[in-house]
């Protein structure tokens, strides 16, 4: 696929594995047919974590494609003295500066897509970062309400959207509404058409309770909230089924029947995704005017600098960003 303009990646927390995995991803560029990308980071820090992998500065994103075959292009944010695995305020400020500039380049249309490296939310909050996470930051930069930025986790075997994410399980039933479920499924369906090339996406919706509530005997959220949302979407002509029992949705035969599984809470979605696609999972933000992906893992401070961290999710995030950007550019 042809990508219009290079991708841009934020480095994530420089004390984590993000910078070294971007360097490792560049090293496998030919094996994985990666589109050209540049990293917004400290050049000196990238060189220190890259080792023998060539890293060179660029002053403009447009220079990335010409350099990409010979070295990893870096938009330099200045020097940084950072020990792997030991987060600092200075490192958090660098991570935020990287996220801000990479996002701005993508929103301005200079980059075809944005790949965000893993951050440490607690470290960013210490320096005044007010958003719950990168998804909300990117949504705000795009002028999109946080509730309309939908998180999808995608791998070779499964795509999932959790209706609720980082909240206590006890809070989930009160957060689920007919409007929330219907609105987010519409956003997801549109993105599957535009960015993933699925003309009529098949969407399976999980119940909240065991056995999807068993007709109210194990909870009535399916009857009161989930089923009405599904019926509303089906009346609009969408290929939506459910609510389905969560324990029978994710075996191989069941997965053949849908393109996306919509789940009611974090672990209902992420446990099967990580069981099936742990080293190839990608976090994709749907509903934005830009493409944004991220590897589905955290900073892994304990692995930083050891060389043991796998670049698989980073490679997958770069590939998915490029594929989505190309499809969106050609979407009628």
Image (cartoon, helix red, strand yellow):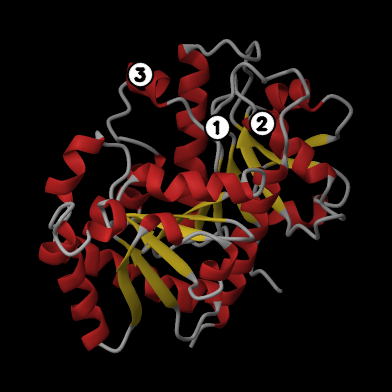
Is residue 132 at all visible to an observer of this figure?
yes
Q: Which residue is mark 3?
A: 127
Q: Earlier in the sequence, mark 1 or mark 2?
A: 1
Label 2, secondary structure: give it.
helix
Q: CA distance from mark 1 to mark 2?
A: 7 Å
How many marks are shown on the rendered structure?
Answer: 3
For the point 39% across and 48% down, the residue is: 268
Nearer the observer, 300 or 97: 300
Of residues 285 and 39, the one nearer the viewer is: 285
205 shown above or below 102: below
Tag 1 near tag 2, CB within 8 Å: yes
Residue 12 tag number: 1
- Where in the figure is residue 279, as x and y percent of width and height? 67, 44
Q: Position of residue 142 (x, y in %)?
A: 34, 56
Relative to 137, does residue 76 appear above or below in the rendering?
Answer: above
Q: Could you tell me which quadrant the N terminus lies in? A: bottom right
| Left or right, 44 with reference to 203 | right
Residue 143, quarter of picture: bottom left
* Residue at the image point whose x is 73% and y is 56% from the top: 36
**Residue 82 location, quadrant:** top right
Taking the image as shown, residue 153 lies to the left or right of residue 227, namely right
For label 2, the residue is 19
Label drawn at residue 21: none
Q: CA distance from mark 3 to mark 2?
A: 21 Å
Mark 2 is surrounded, within 10 Å at the Cα level, by few (under 14), some (14 to 19) or many (20 or more) other residues, namely many
Q: Quadrant of residue 15?
A: top right
User: With respect to residue 284, does 4 lie above or below?
Assistant: below
- Residue 45 pos. (x, y %): 69, 22
Q: Residue at x 59, y 34 (%)?
A: 11
């Amino acid at each position: 696929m042809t990508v219009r303009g290079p991708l841009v990646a934020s480095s994530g927390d420089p004390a984590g594995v993000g910078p070294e995995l971007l360097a490792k991803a560049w090293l496998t560029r030919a094996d994985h047919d990666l589109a050209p990308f540049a990293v917004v980071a400290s050049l000196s820090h990238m060189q220190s974590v890259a080792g023998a992998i060539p890293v060179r500065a660029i002053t403009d994103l447009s220079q990335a494609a010409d350099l990409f075959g010979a070295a990893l292009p870096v938009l330099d944010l200045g020097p940084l003295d950072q020990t792997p695995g030991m987060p600092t305020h200075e490192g958090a400020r660098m991570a935020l500066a990287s996220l801000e500039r990479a996002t701005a380049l993508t929103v301005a249309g200079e980059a075809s897509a944005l790949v965000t490296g893993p951050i440490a939310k607690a470290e960013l909050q210490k320096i005044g970062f007010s958003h719950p996470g990168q998804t909300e930051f990117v949504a705000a930069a795009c002028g999109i309400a946080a509730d309309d930025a939908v998180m999808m986790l995608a791998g070779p075997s499964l795509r999932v959207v959790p209706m609720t994410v980082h909240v206590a399980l006890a809070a989930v039933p009160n957060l689920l509404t007919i409007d929330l479920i219907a609105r987010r499924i519409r956003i997801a369906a549109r993105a599957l058409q535009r960015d993933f090339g699925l003309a009529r996406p098949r969407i399976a919706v999980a119940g909240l309770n065991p056995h999807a509530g068993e007709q109210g005997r194990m909870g009535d959220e399916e009857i009161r909230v989930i089923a009405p949302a599904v019926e509303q979407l089906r009346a609009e002509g969408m290929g939506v089924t459910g609510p389905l029992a969560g324990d029978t949705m994710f075996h191989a035969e069941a997965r053949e029947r849908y393109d996306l599984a919509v789940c009611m809470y974090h672990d209902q979605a992420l446990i099967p995704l990580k069981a099936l696609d742990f080293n190839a999972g990608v976090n994709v933000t749907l509903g934005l005017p830009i493409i944004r992906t991220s590897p589905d893992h955290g900073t892994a401070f304990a692995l930083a600098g050891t060389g043991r961290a796998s670049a698989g999710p980073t490679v997958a995030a770069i590939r998915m960003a490029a594929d989505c950007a190309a499809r969106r550019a050609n979407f009628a």
